[in-house]
Amino acid sequence: MVYRSLLYGDVPHRLFSPRPVIGILLRLSRLVGALLGVVFGAILWVGTCSAQEAPEAVAQPRQVATVSTSQVSQDTKQEKKDKVRAKYDVDCIGDRGIGHGVNMYSLSHERSVGESLAKGVEQRSKLLNDPVVTDYVNRVGQKIVRNSDAEVPFVIKVLDSPGIGAFGLPGGFLYVDSGLLLATDSEAELAGILAHEIAHVAARHATRATTRRYFWDLLLPVSLMGGPIGVGVQEGGGIAFPFSLKKFSRDAEREADLLGIEYQYAAGYDPEAFVVALEKLQALEKRMHSLWTKVPGYHLMTRVPFHRQLAKAFASYPPTEDRLRKLQTEISSLLPARTDYVLDTSEFQEVKSRLASREAPLLRRHSQDGTPGNAGPLLRRNRL
């Protein structure tokens, strides 16, 4: 995912640097100091007021409400479930405030960043020169966008690449590998993968992750203040920073899974098709894992204490098995049942066949002297 590259600094830093950075850091360092003073002052004031009111409180009869800990825990869990249901209510797509978290980038700034990144992608990659295929993919993608929480228009293009994937850029730019169409078996599978990437853009995961990075950077002036607060920030921040970013990345992936199946469902596609696509990914991961087990020294790493917990903590993606389990639960609990879904279309199969024939090797008939013949027939062998 491209938002992971933005998260860990693989994208040119100048594109995401707020201007002027130095001035902002100086102002915010002063602001942090002022806020700390206000907080400590408020604590002292509250303590003073509490001390003054203490005698009256002692004189009054006290009424103690007895509530069991288990009841409080159940109420808290139910409130959390209700809050999640309200936020991800599929009937309120477009009016749910998705992507409205803390973000120092406006939509227009995010769009300009996406345009700069898109230019770089197109300079390094080759676009597919087939209007039939590109128009079809664009129509499927735009159908998903119309049924999403996205607040920006989308530009969808197909890359002439054997890769099996798609990625979205901030501001509404989506690129799809032509190899993805050959790897998927139905239009609903393709729509599910596109919906997942559109969800990343709609939730503004890339710029929210970058904002998170800058907030950590702003703690630097506080760590230089000295004293217990500065030491705590300096010691704890170095450990918490990578874990926080990786947890954000995993949470973003889970949210994109949920939003993606909702957009897919709202557009009329079978959300189970995305589960099928993930199962294919899981099968691929298992094959890759079996290859890794043959590498000398691999089993030594598995003997490290708590290696599973450490691998999970440092992972940028949640385990595919966990994603599948969670998706199945969300499909059954959050999406109302339907009798009819779009699973596949003849147009998808036609486009896929068109791409397959285009990818087939060309065989030229040679002349008797061994040189390629210009006038001879051109034979095209289709892939099986």
Image (cartoon, rainbow, N blue to C red):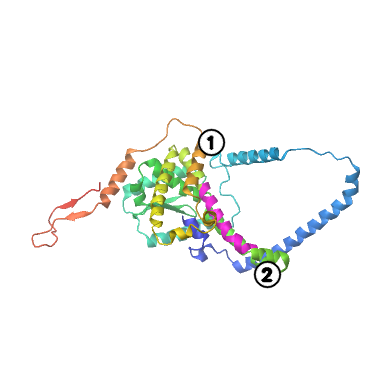
From this view, report whether residue 306 is shown above or below residue 348.
Answer: below
Q: Position of residue 307 (x, y in %)?
A: 52, 56
Q: Position of residue 269 (x, y in %)?
A: 43, 38
The residues tagged by marks 1 and 2 sit, at their Cα atoms, a distance apart of 49 Å
Give SS at disc 1.
helix
Residue 254 counted in the magenta span: yes
- Label annotation for residue 277: none
What residue would you read off at disc 2?
224
Q: Quadrant of residue 85?
A: top right
Give SS at disc 2.
loop
Residue type, mark 2 in image: Leu
Other residues around mark 1 within 10 Å, as few (<14) / some (14–19) / many (≥20): few
Q: Residue at x 25, y 51 (%)?
A: 360
Q: Position of residue 249 (x, y in %)?
A: 53, 54
- Label annotation for residue 333: 1
- Indicate left or right for 349 with 9 as reference: left
